[in-house]
Image: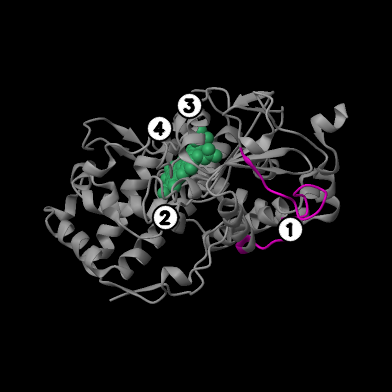
Amino acid sequence: RKVNENYFILALCQRIKCVDGKPLEEKVCVIPGKTIFGNNFDVLNLTPGKLFELTRGWAKFSRGRSYVLHFLKAPVYNIINAEDAEQLFQSQTLTTKGIMYDLIRSFLGNGLLMSQETALGVKLTDIAGDIEYRAAIHNVEAILVERACNPLMYYEIIFYLFGQYRKCKHYVEIAHNFSGKIINKKRKEFIENGNNSCNVDKENSYGKTRYAMLDTLLYQEAQGLVDHQGICEEVDTFMFEGYDTTSTCLKFALLNLAQYPDIQEKCYQEIENLTAFENLTVFEFNKLEYLGCVIKETLRMYPSVPFIGRQCTEETVLNGLILPANAQINIHIIDIMRDSKHFPEPSVFKPERFFAENTRNMHPFAFVPFSAGSRNCIGQKFAMLEIKAALVAILRTYRVLPVTQTKDLILEYVVYRISSTNPYILA
Ligand code: HEM
């Protein structure tokens, strides 16, 4: 009996308990598994689209309450509302990323992927092989989702023997070679410049000298503070975090603007009020408040990162629950931001939700597209600026017309893929 109290024997994982000793079901929704083996077989072989659908189904089933799943390696506490997210985001100890991240880390070191932006001081299109690189990244992501849907594949040895280990390794090598080329190109320029940055922005609006991130790292390498491997991991991490996120938001913002011509017109008028287009600074972009609200509402409805994960390194008390060591916590940012308690009519696109007068009393963790707390997104200001800059350039020149309607979209984990290849047109 004692074993049964502590373990969900057939799911082969430990149980989560309530601090006050009451049944777990009183605090959270426990999602019944399709079989007697917990939820292990619920996700088996699902496509990224079906996985997304299933997860939204769980949120609907639990009626807004956070919920618990039982998997082979650990129980998973799924947070889907701002109230339950608060303690986690404020925690100084729950900062270790979840088991899903290990699936990437084992192949990609401490990060990877790519970026359209120039935080590195290099345009990706200037380096040969950028198309293969983008394809390789998406292939790695597809393998990751497939692996994540099979609890057995979390074991390295099983993945090595029966999973897509070799394919994944191949794509990761392509990606690593590409980021290596970026670093080498910059290092050459850096040395030619007498160990000095070539990408200094001395005249920026803050009156401070700013360097591209890669230049800073190369400078530190010259001082012996970081080695080549360290630079690779930082570059890969920034490329991973910075590319799909901003481009996904940009795509959805255009899609929304195409569907709401009156909102697009307001953005256009705001942009037209700007002067000195040739030399726009951060201050000018900050004046685009309505456009900022459009981007926020886009991120609320279609967050580029729909969920994040944490794991308990030791037994942890959270929201009145005792989570055993190794328990996983998934924070479903998308469900938190579609909660009708904080965002009435959550499926309707309304940029005015983010007008200053409407956000004064907003729950501090209701809008969290960039996460919150000590592991929040360090690129968020850069991302907002980048998205604004791209939208200004597009909306000044083109009127965006709809082809696909948002109701026809099929959303998937990994990359939100839009079912039509032409979701909008530029006129
Ligand atoms: C719309 C664009 C973006 C969104 C929605 C976004 C969202 C997020 C989220 C939700 C996290 C937390 C991840 C977690 O806890 O596991 C995160 C972390 C991070 N982001 Fe972003 N991000 C965006 C753009 C960027 C850009 C442009 C960069 C870099 C240039 C960047 C760099 C990072 C880094 C380095 C982290 C890791 C921080 C840490 O773990 O301490 N992000 N981002």
Asked if the residue under mark 2 is in contact with the one under mark 1, i.e. CB atoms within 8 Å, the reply is: no
Residue bearing the label numbered 2: 301
Instruction: Categorize mark 2 by other alpha carbons within 10 Å: few (<14), some (14-19), many (20+).
Output: many
Amino acid type, mark 3: Gln
Asked if the residue under mark 1 is in contact with the one under mark 4, i.e. CB atoms within 8 Å, the reply is: no
Question: In the rendered picture of this protein, how many numbered marks are placed on residues?
Answer: 4
SS majority, magenta = loop
| Vertical side of 2 occupied by 203: above or below | below
Chain part drawn in magenta: 28-49
Instruction: Categorize mark 4 by other alpha carbons within 10 Å: few (<14), some (14-19), many (20+).
Output: few
Amino acid type, mark 1: Lys
Asked if the residue under mark 4 is in contact with the one under mark 3, i.e. CB atoms within 8 Å, the reply is: no
Q: Earlier in the sequence, mark 4 or mark 1?
A: 1
Residue bearing the label numbered 4: 194
Name the quarter where the N terminus is drawn. Answer: top right
| Alpha carbons under labels 1 and 2: distance apart | 34 Å
Residue bearing the label numbered 1: 167
The dot on residue 90 is 3
Say which element carries label 4. loop
Amino acid type, mark 4: Gly
- Residue 42 inside the magenta-drawn segment: yes
- Residue 340 inside the magenta-drawn segment: no
Q: Earlier in the sequence, mark 4 or mark 2?
A: 4
